[in-house]
Amino acid sequence: MTRNTPSRDQANMLEKCLRILQAYRSGDMHLRLADLAQRTGMPKSTVHRLAHVLIEHRLLSHDEQGYQLGIALFELSSLVPVEQQLRLAALPFLQDLFMATHETVHLGVREGVDVVYVEKIHGHSDLGLPSRVGGRLPLNCTGIGKALLAFSSDEVRADYLARPLRRITDKSVTDPARLSRELSEVRATGLAFEREEATIGRECVAAPVLVQGEVVAAMSISVPVSAYRMPHLAAAVKTSALGLSRYLRNAQEVLENGTRSVSREADSPRGERVVTMRMT
């Protein structure tokens, strides 16, 4: 065994610690020791011992209600590239969308069969929404998820439609044929709709964020059914998504042009200056 290779015991301990952290699901604030033991399949004594290790590293915290995820996880999440780059680029567009509607707005990306929420600005009527930053929901139950799925590759859509579709409410779309028809409409209109499929009493409209034909994210507005004003909301979210798409596309072109310029300088003969002229 080399000096830097972790022992089998250390690797086993790390795996068990990860199982504890991954036991938390969307909506969980606190979990009791018994809950963690049940979800991880580990004895309470093992969970109790490892939980104290996680608490020391601020990955968990503990109070009279039980164990909750620690502040160190929040600090680490802010360093994830998609969080840093996409979120920072999108924030001005999300803020404009919120100011225009005063309703809850989201930014999400696809990870596997779920939408993961990268940013959320809470509206005045946000009560009851299951979404949270860093949380995930099934693609078929959300407007953002449908927008992401509609503009994904044919292979991704076919794989998703071949799976059992999950249900959150009685109005969630679980029929593959119906979902396929909805996705075709989303591709045709550039808008995805969710009608009480994630939360009863709430509806949303979403639009994809496309960069050079690839869907990189989606934005949505969620409102109470009583406040649903489809033409106004659809125009607002589509305008914001198009603005973010243009911003990201321009940023990518600037980066690619800069990379090509550096490459040309590196490849030019020694002593030869490469001069770039700007046409005015």
Image (tube, rainbow, N blue to C red):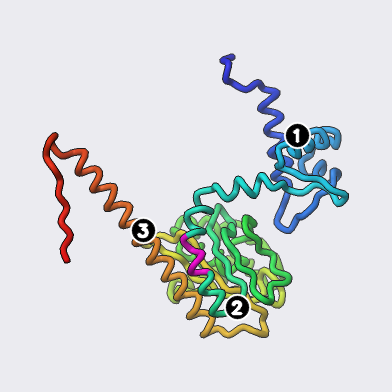
In magenta, the rendered stretch is: 89-94
The residue labelled by disc 3 is 251
| Left/right of residue 180 with respect to residue 21 in the rendered view | left
- Specify the quadrant of the image occupied by residue 18: top right
Give coordinates of residue 243: x percent, y percent: 42, 70
In front: 148, or 227? 227
Q: Earlier in the sequence, mark 2 or mark 3?
A: 2
Q: Give the residue type that dot 1 points to.
A: Val
Residue type at the position of mark 2: His
Q: Secondary structure at mark 1?
A: helix
- Where residue 51 sits: x, y (%)? 78, 38
Q: Main secondary structure of the magenta part?
A: helix
Q: Residue at x 69, y 68 (%)?
A: 129
Could you say where residue 2 lies in the image, as x and y percent from the top left?
Answer: 56, 15
Dot 3: within a 10 Å radius of its alpha carbon, few (fewer than 14), some, or many (20 or more) residues?
A: few
Residue 235's place in the image compared with 32, above or below, is: below
Measuring from the top left, give residue 29's x and y in whole percent.
Answer: 77, 55
Q: Is residue 84 magenta?
A: no
Indicate which disc residue 102 carries.
2
The quarter of the rendered structure image containing the N terminus is: top right
- The numbered mark at residue 53 is 1
From the viewer's side, name the closer residue of 251 and 7: 251
- Relative depth, front residue between 239 and 268: 268
Label 3 residue SS: helix
